[in-house]
Amino acid sequence: MAKAEAQRLDRKNFIVDGSKVKRLKRVLRTSSESEAIRVAVDRALNAEEAIAALERLRKRGTWGKNLAH
């Protein structure tokens, strides 16, 4: 796993497209489908946090301004 800290893992039962999960495993080069899903969830959460941070900058009016001048 990407994170060094201990993670609490819960068993979940999802209905997903198996071929997409296998493709995800290949694309992410993970050792298991479960790991691929965990990595994908982490990446999605990180992306949402980044989008929220950029939205806060935009609302403050600091997005896209040259702050060096």
Image (cartoon, rainbow, N blue to C red):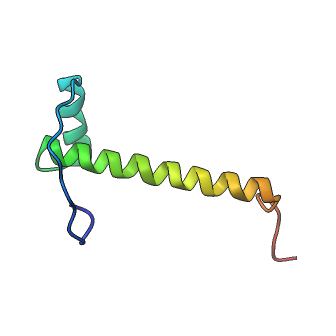
Residue in the picture at 75% in, 54% down: 58
Left or right position of 55 against 8: right
Q: Position of residue 62 (x, y in %)?
A: 79, 62
Nearer to me, 20 or 14: 14
Q: Position of residue 21 (x, y in %)?
A: 21, 32
Residue in the picture at 21% in, 29% down: 14
Nearer to me, 22 or 56: 56
Residue in the picture at 24% in, 71% down: 5
Q: Is residue 31 depicted above or below 1 in this figure?
A: above
Nearer to me, 11 or 36: 11
Q: Position of residue 34 (x, y in %)?
A: 16, 44
Q: Kindly indicate the quadrant of the structure image that contains residue 22.
A: top left
Residue found at the very far left of the displayed protein:
31
Left or right position of 27 against 54: left
Residue found at the very far right of the displayed protein:
69
Quadrant where the C terminus sits is: bottom right
Q: How many marks?
A: 0
Residue in the picture at 17% in, 48% down: 10
Q: Position of residue 61 (x, y in %)?
A: 83, 58
Q: Kindly indicate the quadrant of the structure image that contains residue 12.
A: top left
Left or right position of 48 against 30: right
Q: Is residue 15 depicted above or below 32 in this figure?
A: above
Residue found at the very far bottom of the displayed protein:
68
Quadrant where the N terminus sits is: bottom left
